[in-house]
Amino acid sequence: MSDYQVSNPATGEIEATYPTATEQDIQHAIEQADNAYQEWQKTSLSERSAIMNKVADIYIDRQDELARIVANEMGKPVGQAKGEIGLVAEIYRYYADNAEQLLAPNTIDVDQGSASVEKLPVGTLFGIMPWNYPHYQVARFVAPNVMAGNTIILKHAPQCPNTAEVIVDILKDAGLPDGVYNNVFATNEQAATIIEDSKVQGVSLTGSERAGQAVAKIAGGALKKVVLELGGSDAFIVAADADIEQAVEGAIEGRFGNTGQACNAAKRLIVVDSVYDQFVKGFTDAVRGMSLADPHNEKTFIGPMSSKSAAQNLQEQLDGAIKAG
């Protein structure tokens, strides 16, 4: 059975299954991306910009539909999913409008002659993206690199295959040439094959430390450029002069936004003694006032966790914390 399937977190039902890529599919994606790069790198910034602005337009036009798909796949409440889609449109538009300035050569002061740093495309890049922000994470990788003249092979999270295919459709509808962006429903072993291929110049992963270690090892062995974003242990600090009502609101959003499933969520709340009791009471009352609700309801703040295993892992952490005092 394929790992790529839509398992609705709100119902537990498997709504769709997608076939895993064959070895031929993987090689075709690599060849197609490499061939497309030969032409894409020659296109003008104005041509690329027009396409990226069109991508932004499509995201806004399809905002409601895309948010519903995200809710079905990983449980994000639709109101928050719409916010993600809006941010994605801004990302594509930002790079469309600012690429000329961002990619301009930087002149360096030297004693003799002249020198400058050129910003040129490198070729095909491989992205491995997570489920928690299924459009945003892709956009922030794709938009700057496509504007720079690179081509993309992308492995999305196995629980977001519908979103993965929708992204392909959006980019195609916006006029992106075939091969510039390539989605692959790859296994971990196939991902290693992609990284090691001589036609692929680098890899970017957002995910767990375990996944990052595996990708870094493969990329290092192949002497490939690698970018890793691997979680965090972010602190939310409440100082003595804080507006406690505002601090509580910020802490609730920072800890429970996206049902708490964010790498930059507030993992530790650090509160000074003088306002500790007041903050804890406000925070506790706010948490007790929240309830799990249907992610398709516009007013829902807390939806289901992304999977049954995620909920089980969280329960184990909670049980362990209580047992430890």
Image (cartoon, grey):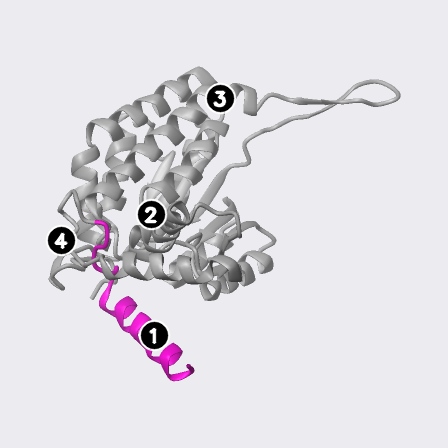
Give the foreground label among 2 and 4: 4
On the image, numbered disc 2 is attached to which residue? 133
Q: Earlier in the sequence, mark 1 or mark 3?
A: 3
Q: Quadrant of residue 317?
A: bottom left
**Residue at the image position 44 percent from the left and 57 percent from the top:** 193
Which element is circle 1 on? helix
Task: Identify the disc placed on residue 294.
Answer: 4
Query: Is 304 colored magenta in this rendering?
Result: yes
Q: Earlier in the sequence, mark 1 or mark 4?
A: 4
Front residue of this view, candidates 308 and 43: 308
On the image, numbered disc 3 is attached to which residue? 98
Q: Quadrant of residue 110?
A: top right
On the image, numbered disc 1 is attached to which residue? 318
Give the foreground label among 1 and 3: 1
Q: CA distance from mark 3 to mark 2?
A: 24 Å
Q: CA distance from mark 1 to mark 4?
A: 23 Å
User: Taking 247 as reference, is 240 left or right?
Assistant: right
* Amino acid type of the residue that numbered disc 2 sits on in the rendered structure: Tyr
